[in-house]
Amino acid sequence: MTLRPPAVALPPALAPLEMSVPASDGLVLKGILEYPNRPGGNRFPLAVLAHQYPATRDSFAPLIDDLLVHGLATLAFDERGHGASIRGPSGPVVIDTPVGFTMEAFGAAFIGSASRVGFNRIDDDILRVASWGAAQNFVDPKRILLIGSSVGGTGVVLASTKVPNLVGVITFGAAGELVWGPDGKQQARRAIEQIKAPCLLTTSEKDPFKGAALVLDWSKGLSHVTTKQVPGDAHGMAIYYDVREEVLGFLRKLAG
């Protein structure tokens, strides 16, 4: 009887981790950390993803697939009042959603949610989520990428100055800057000026929330900022397939 040595097997894949992080006001933020399906022992760059109102972290599904293929771990979380992030210290905290199909209904629901749920804390939420992710096994805390859509886009821009090992920022139709006060736009511009990490700011040309104007304002005169505008009026992650090649090119440049 001839005994054969066992075949060399690849290390088992890393399992996703469920995140629970307390926000500054006690609301519990929930998310999922996923790792690329690559041999164990690696430390992966981390992409932290903040979605648009009134979506959930699942709206990033196609982008998450692309990030994992390119060797990044991903940490997508439900923003406050969305999805699973609705448990506050005094009970449920849930966003208002539009009643009706007009921009007026959407705007009223967003404004009501912003004040009641505390959207002006989103940048601090992002910082806390990124800090949790950077502390996990197999994550390289010196390579953090922030990605945001709509109000999450403005949130990652504002959070970026507090991430010392930032390697880049990507936004899709960043909006909702007035959540942070009448100078929200200026706050974001100052943040982008300060960070110096490469940024990719994307939007549609007729974004209903003035995304094109924000992209122009936040990028003017800054060599570390790349912009992409696409035809139409789609908002947030609805433009992903239109800007996907630019995003993948940006990721390849970050990888060197």
Image (spheres, rainbow, N blue to C red):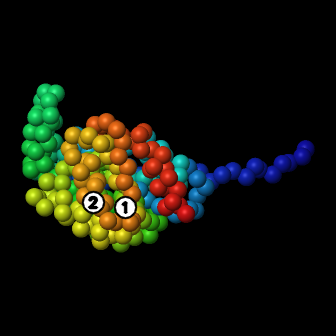
Check contact, mark 2 vs mark 1: CB within 8 A: yes
At label 2, which amino acid type do we have?
Trp
In the rendering, at what x and y percent does residue 177 appear?
A: 18, 54
Q: Is residue 104 visible?
A: yes
Q: Residue at x 9, y 48 (%)?
A: 116
Residue sitting at the far right = 1
Residue sitting at the far top = 100
Task: Tell me the residue that label 1 is attached to.
Answer: 225
Q: Is residue 18 visible?
A: no
At label 1, which amino acid type do we have?
Val
Q: Is 67 left or right of 180, judged from the image as shown?
A: right
Q: Nearer the viewer, residue 243 or 63?
A: 243
In the rendering, at what x and y percent does residue 47 appear?
A: 41, 56
In the rendering, at what x and y percent does residue 87 appear?
A: 19, 48
Q: Nearer the viewer, residue 149 or 230?
A: 230
In the rendering, at what x and y percent does residue 4 appear?
A: 84, 48
Q: Nearer the viewer, residue 190 or 221?
A: 221
Task: Tell me the residue that label 2 is attached to.
Answer: 218
Residue 183 falls in which quadrant of the image? bottom left
Quadrant in which the N terminus appears = top right
